[in-house]
Image (cartoon, helix red, strand yellow):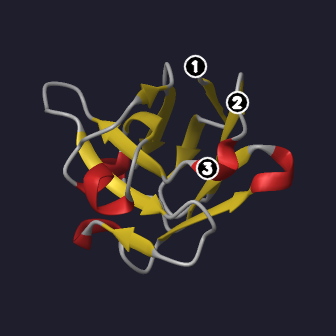
Amino acid sequence: QVQLVESGGGLVQAGGSLRLSCAASGRTLSIYPMGWFRQAPGKEREFVAAIAALGGYILYADSVKGRFTISRDNAKNTVYLQINSLKPEDTAVYYCAAGSSAEGLRRMVSDYWGQGTQVTVSS
């Protein structure tokens, strides 16, 4: 069993940056591909980014390429999402998840989910 806890969300102005963190407990994170997802009000949860267990393979949704960077520190059992040039349309609850593969995470297939952290971008 893996417990995931996201942090780092908040209220920021458009153009600002945030770094979200996803800390794991229960089992080592290093065996899991990890992903970030988001769900805006009234919309379905969508894939944002995924990273392979050892970090060598990364996927991004087209809508965030060039602004979002996923990374991981397996020694700290933590995955990060750096978000730059924030836009109001990035407002959402951001979730991290552990899965079996980065491609599977892109298809929303995951084994464990965190509870989410709210990101609100003001214009």
Q: Check disc 2 and report its element: helix, strand or loop.
A: loop
Marks 1/3 in contact by CB < 8 Å: the verdict is no
Left or right: 63, with 72 as reference point: left
Q: Check disc 1 and report its element: helix, strand or loop.
A: loop
Marks 1/2 in contact by CB < 8 Å: the verdict is yes
Residue farthest along the right direction in this orientation: 75
**Residue 62 seen anywhere in this rendered image of the structure:** yes
Amino acid at circle 3: Ile
**Counting other residues with Cα less than 10 Å from the Cα at mark 2, is it few (<14), some (14-19), or many (20 or more)?**
few
Residue 63 picture quarter? bottom left
Residue 22 picture quarter? top right
- Nearer the observer, 55 or 116: 55
Tag 3 residue: 31
Amino acid at circle 1: Gln
- With respect to residue 24, does 12 lie above or below? below
State which quarter of the image contains the N terminus: top right
Amino acid at circle 2: Arg
- Nearer the observer, 118 or 29: 29
- With respect to residue 4, does 123 lie above or below? below
Name the residue located 49 percent from the left edge and 36 percent from the top edge: 119
Left or right: 58, with 43 as reference point: right
Residue 20 picture quarter? top right
Q: Which numbered marker is on residue 27?
A: 2
Q: CA distance from mark 3 to mark 2?
A: 9 Å
Tag 1 residue: 1
